[in-house]
Image (tube, helix red, strand yellow):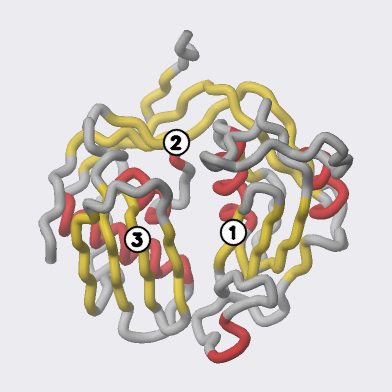
């Protein structure tokens, strides 16, 4: 049974300013591999690289929302996949890379959308306590000028990324908004960030996956019978000092009105 939603139309989006940042060079090609999953990396030097990624996920990245906040009737919004290689021409913060992706979506897909607020089931992520062992603020800020050995953490996570594996999390100078996005994917509901944490963080967390509440990768084996590690919800509290609370509330969503398939270029 589909969840009923209360839809409230928000004011029309203001016109985007002229001269907004754009990638100096951008290559976008259809990916017909048919394989599951995707990858996306924001690399030092203002480089963004994505493989086997859908328009829906590109929109999520460009406008800093989760997949579960994007709606639309386009049949290929998720099925068509692309490879993207884009370069800003100089080191820039992740926020600028997002705006550049917005420009790219306008240019290559002719994307048109509007925003709405919908009453939906969701999780809220809040701060319980600071100083948890798995959430450490990075003193050097973002990755705009990072290069060399500092570009990747000891766990192999690239700078500016938060990676969620079946039973562990690794973040290297990532944002809490990225954490909320990864948790949304795992739990199948939008996770709204209400922590008020605006810095860049190194994150580490381990737990015992629960296939009853988590959307685990295809082929991931069930936990061993004797496993007694913490649940995802407990690990978030104990290791990150945060809390996930389920409930219902307003969620801002993006509704795709129209777009065109991008050709190889």
**Which quadrant of the structure image shows residue 244?**
top right
> Which residue is labeled 2 in the image?
69
Assess disc 2: are there few (<14), some (14-19) or many (≥20) residues with their C-alpha within 10 Å of its C-alpha. Answer: many
Q: Quadrant of the C terminus?
A: bottom left
Who is closer to the viewer here, 112 or 233?
A: 233
Q: Residue at x 43, y 59 (%)?
A: 39
Q: Position of residue 251 (x, y in %)?
A: 52, 31
Q: Position of residue 261 (x, y in %)?
A: 14, 47
Find residue 163 and name its label: 1
Q: If you read the primary sequence from the N terminus, does the residue marked by circle 2 or circle 1 appear first?
A: 2
- Of all residues, the one furthest to the top in this rendering is 1
Q: Position of residue 160 (x, y in %)?
A: 56, 70
The Cα–Cα distance between marks 3 and 2, rounded to whole angstroms, is 22 Å
Q: If you read the primary sequence from the N terminus, does the residue marked by circle 3 or circle 2 appear first?
A: 3
Q: Residue at x 30, y 36 (%)?
A: 114
Q: Residue at x 25, y 61 (%)?
A: 103
Residue 120, above or below 26: above
Q: Residue at x 21, y 42 (%)?
A: 112
Q: Nearest to the eye among marks 3 and 2: give it.
A: 3
> Which residue is labeled 3 in the image?
51
Q: Position of residue 61 (x, y in %)?
A: 42, 54
Residue 165, above or below 67: below
Q: Are marks 2 and 1 in contact (CB under 8 Å)?
A: no
Who is closer to the viewer here, 260 or 224?
A: 224
Q: Secondary structure at mark 3?
A: strand
């Amino acid at each position: 049974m589909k969840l009923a939603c209360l839809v409230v139309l928000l004011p029309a989006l203001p016109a985007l300013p002229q001269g907004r940042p754009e990638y100096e060079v951008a290559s976008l090609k259809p990916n017909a591999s048919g394989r599951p999953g995707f990858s996306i990396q924001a690399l030092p030097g203002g480089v963004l690289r994505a493989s086997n990624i859908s328009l829906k996920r590109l929109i999520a990245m460009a406008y800093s929302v989760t997949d579960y906040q994007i709606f639309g009737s386009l049949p290929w919004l998720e099925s068509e996949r692309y490879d993207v290689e884009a370069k800003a021409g100089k080191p820039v913060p992740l926020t600028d890379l997002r705006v550049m992706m917005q420009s790219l979506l306008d240019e290559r897909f002719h994307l048109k959308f509007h925003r709405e607020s919908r009453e939906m089931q969701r999780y809220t992520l809040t701060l319980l306590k600071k100083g948890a062992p798995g959430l450490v603020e990075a003193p050097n800020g973002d990755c705009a000028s990072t290069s060399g050995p500092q570009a990747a953490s000891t766990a192999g996570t690239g700078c500016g990324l938060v990676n969620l594996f079946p039973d562990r999390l690794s973040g290297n100078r990532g944002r809490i908004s990225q954490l909320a996005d990864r948790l949304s994917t795992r739990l199948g509901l939008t996770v709204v960030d209400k922590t008020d944490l605006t810095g860049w963080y190194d994150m580490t967390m381990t737990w015992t996956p629960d296939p009853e509440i988590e959307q685990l990768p295809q082929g991931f084996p069930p936990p061993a019978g004797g496993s007694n590690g913490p649940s995802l919800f407990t690990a978030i509290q104990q290791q990150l000092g945060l809390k996930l609370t389920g409930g219902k509330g307003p969620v801002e969503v993006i509704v795709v009105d129209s777009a065109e398939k991008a050709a190889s270029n």
